[in-house]
Amino acid sequence: MNRERIPRLHLIGPLNGVLTPDSYAAVAARAAEGGVDAIHVRLPGAPGGEIMRLAEEVMARLGSNVRVTLFVNDRVDVAALVSAGGAHLGERSLPVAQARRLLGVDALIGRSVHDVRGAAQAQDDGADFVLAGHVFDTDSKPDQPGKGVHWISELTRAVSIPVIAIGGISVECVGPVIQAGAWGVAVGRELLTASDPKAVAESIRIRIEQK
Amino acid sequence: MTLERRLRRYLVTDSGAGSVERLVSICEEAIQGGITAVQLRAKDWSDRELLRAACDLRAACDRAGTLFIVNDRVDIALASNADGVHLGVDDLPVGVARELLGPGKVIGYSPETPDDRIAAEEAGVDYLGVGPVFGTQTKGDAGEALRLDRFAELVTQSNVPVIGIGGIAIDDARSVIKAGAVGVAVVGAVFFAKEPRAAAIELVAQIP
């Protein structure tokens, strides 16, 4: 897999309690103008119809912007139906191989991992990239401290597929994470709560590409 | 066996089983007793657990020629090679599910209004689950009971086979069939029975 095909700035949302699904599509579209090239639709436990509607709305807002890949989380059927470019899976989701069978060889399939072993397994299973975290302390997981930048270096030595760092990522810490070997970062709150998501996305993008 | 015949004694599972192994073993017992269709429904279970249950149920249903349906999840139905899916009004629409599943699979649907039903029929649904026929405890959002006379009216209006669902005890099964249903969906009466196999055998006695 050509590394260049893997998006480097992932937006994760809408995040329960941060944005409603309705406002997420608009924020995502703004963030995409600023350089977000992966938009995740993550609505854990929501009915299939609701997930499909949000995915369709994000697709509609992206319009002809082909630089951006939509990742439906967990629901591989929805990913297939809306012709999303990808699916993103957790440790308790469908296995990568099953998702691949339903989505075809061209789809990008990501996998969340929390340790080196999980990352190696995801690579063996055929994942195109891993979302690894959480790297920094985050409000999403208040009881678990961040694993740190050093952990990202460890992961990137252990696997050859791109590692996308997630968890408490702010604009300032993007540089160190990329220097540690991450291919990119995944961001939730930092973009979802920004008054200007496009500007924040731009500053993150610059730091990703600077190296 | 025709679809109508396979829909006759239809078991819906519940996450209250507690584990994949327990859920599958309850279904195996019920199949031995005479259940003709199993729908895997286990709200709040992880996708991994659902897939594991689906693959085990697929095998158990194959051995007995039982219809195997997955609730809501088209991806898990495809991954486990289920016979089809059962969809509700909040789930993926029937038409798009058909696109993914192809013409050979069975799609069931639980309409909440006449418009829902008509749209599903036009989209190519194979059967309808109509209810709750009686009051139910296993599905919190099921709404008010229809009772048999209203249920019979809804069956008459439908253009595809109907199974009755919702609070149906073994002793009620015959009356639901008399009201026009091709089959009866049971949850608690068999799934949570002390002896699921014996409960299924009783159901066969009621509706052979």
Image: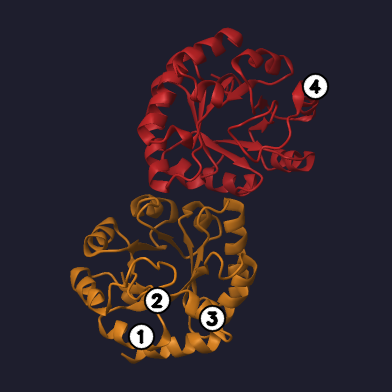
Chain colours: A orange, B red
| Residue A147: image location, x then y, percent | 28, 72
| Residue B87: image location, x then y, percent | 60, 41
Residue that carries the numbered disc 4 in the rendered image: B149
State which quadrant residue B9 falls in: top right
The kind of residue on which mark 1 rests is Cys
The residue mark sitting in front, 2 or 4, is 2
Q: Residue at x 41, y 83 (%)?
A: A170
Residue that carries the numbered disc 3 in the rendered image: A31
Q: Is residue A101 above or below residue B167?
A: below
- The secondary element bearing badge 1 is classed as helix
Residue that carries the numbered disc 2 in the rendered image: A168
State which quadrant residue B154 falls in: top right
The residue mark sitting in front, 4 or 3, is 4
Residue that carries the numbered disc 1 in the rendered image: A173
Which chain does tag 4 point to?
B
- The N terminus of chain A lies in quadrant: bottom left
Residue A152 horizontal side relative to residue A8, left or right: left
